[in-house]
C-alpha cells in the first residue's frame, strides 16, 4: 500500500509580506506554499524539484481524476472488474500507482500489459505553482466509439487551487478531440519482495 498520507490543518494566516511568511512557515510551505514549484514530467531547463511520488502532486492528480471520472465515467462493468485503465508517467512507484487508482475511483486500475486493452485515462503533465496546480490529461470519449471499437481521446487541463490535502477544481479547459496523441504506456512497476525477487504482472 501507499505510504500514509495526512491532511494538514487549515491555518489562519495574517496578511504579511510573502517573504516573511515563507520564512516563518517554511515546514508547511515546503509542502504547498511559496516553495512548491515543480513540473512533472520535467521540462527542459527545469531546476525545481520534481518528484512524481510527492504527496502534493499525487493528491492533485487524484482530485483531477475524480472530477473527470464523475463527468466522463467509463461504462459500468461486472462487479469487481475494472472499468478503465490509468496511464501515469514514468518515475511513479508501484505504491503510488495503486494509491492514485484506488483513490480516484471510477473503476480505475493501473495499466499493465493485461489491462492495456481497457479504455484508458492518461495523465500527461502536472504543474505545481504554490497554491495552484494544473493537471493535463486525456480522457476517452465514449459516445464517439469508432467502428473498430477504439475510442478517440480528448485533452483536458484541470485547474486546481489549494495545497496539500485541500486541492479543489477551479475550472477545466477542454481541447479538440484527437488533437493530442496518447503517450506510450508506463506499465505498473513490478512487485519487489523483501528478498529482492521481482514479480512481473501477468501478460495477456
Image: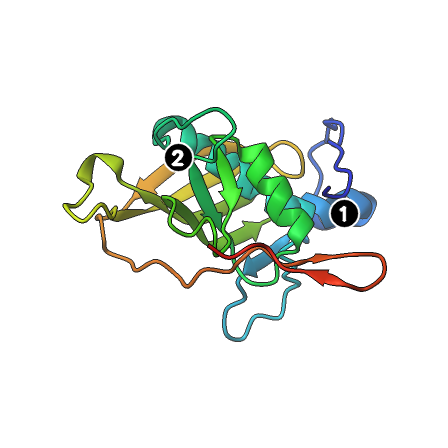
User: Where in the figure is residue 69, as x and y percent of width and height?
Assistant: 42, 32
The answer to whether any part of residue 138 appears in the image is yes
Q: Is residue 33 visible?
A: no
Is 76 placed above or below 138 here? above
Q: Residue at x 65, y 52 (%)?
A: 94
Residue corresponding to mark 1? 20
Label 1 CA crowd tier, 10 Å (few <14, some 14–19, many 20+)? few
The figure's colour scheme reads: rainbow
The answer to whether residue 92 is left or right of residue 125 is right
User: What's the mark number on residue 178?
Assistant: none
Label 1 residue SS: helix
* Residue 142 placement (x, y as % from top left): 26, 36
With respect to residue 180, does 109 lie above or below? above
Q: Which residue is painted at 74% across and 28% down in the image?
A: 11
Question: In this picture, is 88 found above or below 5?
Answer: below
Tell me what residue is drawn at x 85 percent, y 61 percent.
195
Q: Are marks 2 and 1 in contact (CB under 8 Å)?
A: no
Of callouts 2 and 1, which one flags the residue occurring earlier in the amino acid sequence?
Answer: 1
Left or right, residue 63 beside residue 179: right
In this view, the residue farthest toward the right is 195
Q: Which residue is denoted by mark 2 in the rendering?
A: 171
Amino acid at each position: 500500500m501507499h505510504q500514509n498520507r495526512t491532511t494538514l490543518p487549515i491555518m489562519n494566516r495574517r496578511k504579511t509580506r510573502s517573504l516573511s511568511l515563507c520564512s516563518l512557515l517554511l515546514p508547511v510551505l515546503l509542502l504547498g506554499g511559496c516553495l512548491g514549484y515543480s513540473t512533472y514530467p520535467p521540462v527542459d531547463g527545469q531546476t525545481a524539484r520534481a518528484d512524481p511520488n510527492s504527496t502534493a502532486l499525487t493528491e492533485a492528480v487524484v482530485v483531477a481524476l475524480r472530477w473527470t471520472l464523475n463527468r466522463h465515467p467509463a461504462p459500468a462493468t461486472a462487479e469487481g472488474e475494472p472499468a478503465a485503465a490509468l496511464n501515469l508517467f514514468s518515475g511513479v512507484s508501484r505504491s503510488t500507482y495503486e494509491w492514485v487508482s484506488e483513490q480516484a475511483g471510477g473503476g480505475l486500475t493501473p495499466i499493465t500489459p493485461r489491462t492495456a486493452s481497457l479504455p484508458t485515462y492518461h495523465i500527461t503533465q502536472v504543474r505545481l505553482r504554490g497554491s495552484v496546480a494544473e493537471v493535463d490529461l486525456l480522457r476517452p470519449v465514449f459516445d464517439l466509439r469508432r467502428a473498430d471499437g477504439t475510442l478517440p481521446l480528448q485533452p483536458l487541463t484541470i485547474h486546481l487551487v489549494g495545497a496539500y490535502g485541500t486541492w479543489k477544481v477551479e475550472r477545466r479547459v477542454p481541447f479538440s478531440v484527437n488533437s493530442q496523441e496518447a503517450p506510450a504506456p508506463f506499465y505498473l512497476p513490478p512487485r519487489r519482495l523483501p528478498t529482492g525477487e521481482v514479480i512481473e504482472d501477468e501478460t495477456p
